[in-house]
Image (tube, helix red, strand yellow):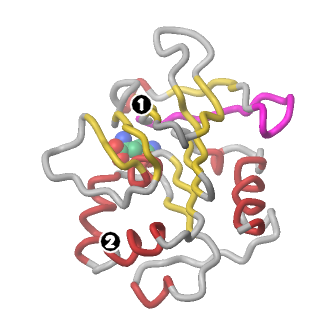
Amino acid sequence: MLERCGAAPRPVRRQAELTGLNGIVLPGGESTTIAKLAAAFELLEPLRAAVRGGLPAYGSCAGMILLADRVTDAPAGQQTIGGIDMTVRRNAFGRQVDSFEGDLEFAVLGEEPVHAVFIRAPWVEQAGPDVEPLARIPSGPAAGRIVAVRQGSMLATAFHPEMTGDSRVHELFVRIVGES
Ligand code: GLN
């Protein structure tokens, strides 16, 4: 997806691989596992320092949890990278079987709605004054819940835009990286 947007992505698994990046994508997966592995590979502190130092970051789903300053419904001691002044609720929509897809209004990406894939997704429970909500759940019991945000050069979505053919979220991130 990033290549399609004109970026040159490469995986980061070791601290040394953080060098020379213009931005970082924190993917979906399992945020407690990602945080534990990041700590074990001595990546957690360098990632915190990089994001604090202004490295643009985009987190999807588990990545959104990792970019949150505060997490609810997390196991005791769950670590995050932080950076976005928000409280994120893990597994907010329920269990794996409650995963779903739906169309979201996402005004900064244009009029065409974004078809969003939510896989045991979080939502944003509370967002600070510098956090710009970009998309919300339109209807149903979770109506109004924030599922995409931007704070400066940090972007996060509760859903997985890499699962669809629509590259507009990644394009937005590549643009943010370019502007910074
Ligand atoms: N439920 C996962 C977590 O808490 C996130 C799921 C995902 O990234 N699709 O980390």
Q: Is residue 3 above or below residue 65?
A: below
| Tag 2 residue | 44
Instruction: Please indicate whether residue 8 sits to the left or right of residue 69 in the image.
Output: right
> Is ligand 1 less than 8 Å from the beta carbon at label 2?
no
- Was residue 109 drawn as part of the magenta stretch in this picture? yes
Residue 21: assigned label: none
Instruction: Please indicate whether residue 164 sits to the left or right of residue 51 in the image.
Output: right
Instruction: Please indicate whether residue 180 sits to the left or right of residue 4 in the image.
Output: left
- Was residue 128 drawn as part of the magenta stretch in this picture? no
> Which residue ends up furthest to the top in the rendered image?
140
Residue 178 in the image, given as x and y percentages of width and height:
77, 69
Residue 60 in the image, given as x and y percentages of width and height:
53, 49
Amino acid at the residue labelled 1:
Gln
Assess disc 1: are there few (<14), some (14-19) or many (≥20) residues with their C-alpha within 10 Å of its C-alpha. Answer: some
Give the camera-side residue of 165 and 57: 57
The quarter of the displayed image where residue 23 is located = bottom right
Question: Image quadrant of ligand 1?
Answer: top left
Residue 86 in the image, given as x and y percentages of width and height:
42, 40
Instruction: Please indicate whether residue 17 sits to the left or right of residue 162 in the image.
Output: left
| Tag 1 residue | 126
Q: Residue at x 64, y 24 (%)?
A: 102
Q: Residue at x 13, y 46 (%)?
A: 76
Start-end of magenta stretch: 107-120
Label 2 to label 1, Cα distance in Å? 24 Å
Amino acid at the residue labelled 2:
Leu
| Image quarter hosting the N terminus | bottom right
